[in-house]
């Protein structure tokens, strides 16, 4: 393999401007539009590859560490520049990929946040989600080429995807390899990229995905949908789509595990005498029996009227915290009746008693604010 500095006709300590000027001069001389000869075409490929390597500071540094003349060479470098590649070759550091790499790669995973109503998670629901993602290009079907064309073998690396160089070292001649700068290690080039996807094999588009959201999910839970992420470059396999659930706040009901919580405001007379009420829950009406003498902060439990369990059978319960409402505006007749009722009972002076915390914390906070 010819030395890149020799190909461009420059010294090893040439500046970036010197490299660019040398390339432009040779390109004007060897470009196929100016010089159609086969020899000029071959030289032009070598010149282009040499410029690609030397114009990139990282690639140039790697080349200088292991290039011809690195040890004992005639061009301006110190005598021990080849040690980096030598140690990598013998002790496994930075091993190079063997053979060309595939253009087809797995697509990226995607994360989508989905808001659901509390009603929807009682029994689960199905959503039609619109996702802006990468999909397979219909024009080239992932080939990256214009219709009727195909990738061609790289003339620089001859399809291997690697450029090999012989390094002279204390241990003798050592063969090193690095990805081909002309084809970027693919081993092939695409002379006529697909005009629709610009040679990527995929395009951005919106698509609709039906999603089953199971019953019992809660805020923060992630659902994995394998293969529903974006398609990979050159039609590679799809990544996965992850849905992060957020359950919206309900104005009446809240949640504690698989149980539903609610507060029932009860008139003082109904609390004293007892009553029966029909209430509308998240999945239909529920009948509630209020016993005589019901107190504030008592909790009524309706079995199996909560949320369907995410893992396991059955449902949670509906727990109703009682809040007895004391009337604040009484007419003279009502006031007289209350006074007569109070006079008929033995007086009990107000006093402190043991604080009733309640059976669950979410209702407790509401009771504390009464």
Image (spheres, rainbow, N blue to C red):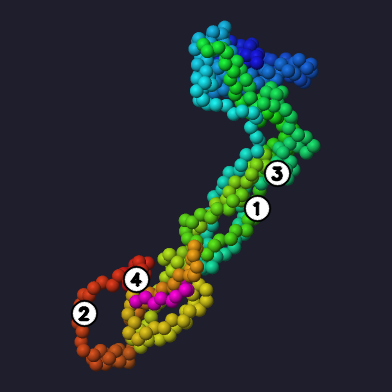
Depth order, front residue of 60/309? 309
* Circles 2 and 3: CB atoms closer than 8 Å: no
* Circles 3 and 4: CB atoms closer than 8 Å: no
* Circles 4 and 2: CB atoms closer than 8 Å: no
Drawn side of residue 256 relative to residue 90, left or right: left
Q: How far apart are marks 2 and 1 (CA)?
A: 67 Å
* Circles 1 and 4: CB atoms closer than 8 Å: no
Which of disc 1 and disc 2 is earlier in sequence? 1
Residue picked out by circle 4? 359
Which of disc 3 and disc 2 is earlier in sequence? 3
Q: How far apart are marks 1 and 4 (CA)?
A: 47 Å
State which quarter of the image contains the C terminus: bottom left
On residue 350, which mark appears?
A: 2
Taking the view exactly as shown, the residue that stands out farthest to the top is 74
In the image, is residue 364 above or below residue 347?
above
Depth order, front residue of 108/311? 311
1 or 4: mark nearer the eye: 4
On residue 137, which mark appears?
A: 3
Label 1, secondary structure: give it.
Answer: strand
Residue picked out by circle 1? 207
> Which residue appears at 37% of the width and 86% of the height?
274
Q: How far apart are marks 3 and 1 (CA)?
A: 13 Å
2 or 3: mark nearer the eye: 3
Q: How far apart are marks 4 and 2 (CA)?
A: 25 Å
Label 4, secondary structure: give it.
Answer: loop
Depth order, front residue of 159/76? 159
Res 18 visible: no
In the image, is residue 269 above or below residue 75?
below
> Which residue appears at 59% of the width and 24% of the height?
178
Q: Give the range drawn in magenta.
A: 298-306
Which of disc 4 and disc 1 is earlier in sequence? 1
Q: Is residue 18 magenta?
A: no
């Amino acid at each position: 393999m010819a030395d890149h500095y020799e190909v461009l006709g420059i010294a090893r300590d040439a500046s970036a401007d010197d490299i660019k000027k040398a390339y432009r001069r040779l390109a004007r001389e060897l470009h196929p539009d100016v010089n159609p000869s086969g020899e000029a075409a071959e030289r032009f490929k070598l010149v282009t590859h040499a410029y690609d390597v030397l114009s990139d500071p990282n690639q140039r540094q790697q080349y200088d560490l292991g290039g011809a003349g690195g040890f004992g060479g005639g061009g301006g470098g110190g005598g021990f520049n080849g040690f980096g590649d030598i140690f990598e070759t013998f002790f496994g550091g930075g091993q190079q990929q063997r053979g060309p790499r595939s253009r087809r790669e797995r697509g990226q995973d995607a994360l989508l946040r989905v808001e659901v109503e509390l009603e929807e998670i009682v029994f689960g629901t199905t959503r039609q989600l619109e996702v802006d993602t990468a999909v397979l290009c219909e024009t080239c079907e992932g080939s990256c080429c214009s219709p009727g064309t195909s990738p061609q073998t790289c003339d620089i690396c001859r399809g291997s995807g690697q450029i090999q160089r012989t390094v002279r070292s204390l241990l003798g001649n050592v063969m090193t390899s690095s990805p081909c700068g002309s084809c970027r290690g693919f081993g092939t080039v695409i002379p006529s990229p697909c005009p629709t996807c610009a040679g990527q094999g995929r395009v951005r588009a919106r698509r609709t995905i039906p999603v089953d959201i199971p019953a019992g999910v809660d805020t923060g839970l992630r659902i994995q949908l394998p293969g529903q992420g974006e398609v990979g470059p050159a039609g590679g396999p799809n990544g996965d789509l992850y849905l992060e659930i957020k359950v919206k706040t309900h104005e009446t009901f809240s949640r504690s595990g698989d149980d539903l919580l609610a507060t029932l405001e009860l008139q003082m007379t109904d609390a004293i005498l007892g009553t029966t009420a029909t209430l509308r829950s998240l999945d239909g009406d529920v009948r509630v029996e209020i016993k005589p003498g019901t107190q504030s902060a008592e909790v009524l439990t309706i079995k199996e009227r909560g949320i369907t369990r995410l893992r396991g059978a059955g449902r949670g319960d509906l727990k109703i915290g009682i809040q007895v409402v004391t009337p604040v505006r009484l007419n003279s007749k009502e006031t007289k009746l209350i006074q007569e009722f109070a006079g008929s009972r033995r007086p009990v002076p107000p006093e402190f008693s043991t604080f009733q915390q309640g059976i669950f914390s979410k209702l407790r906070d509401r009771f504390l604010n009464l």
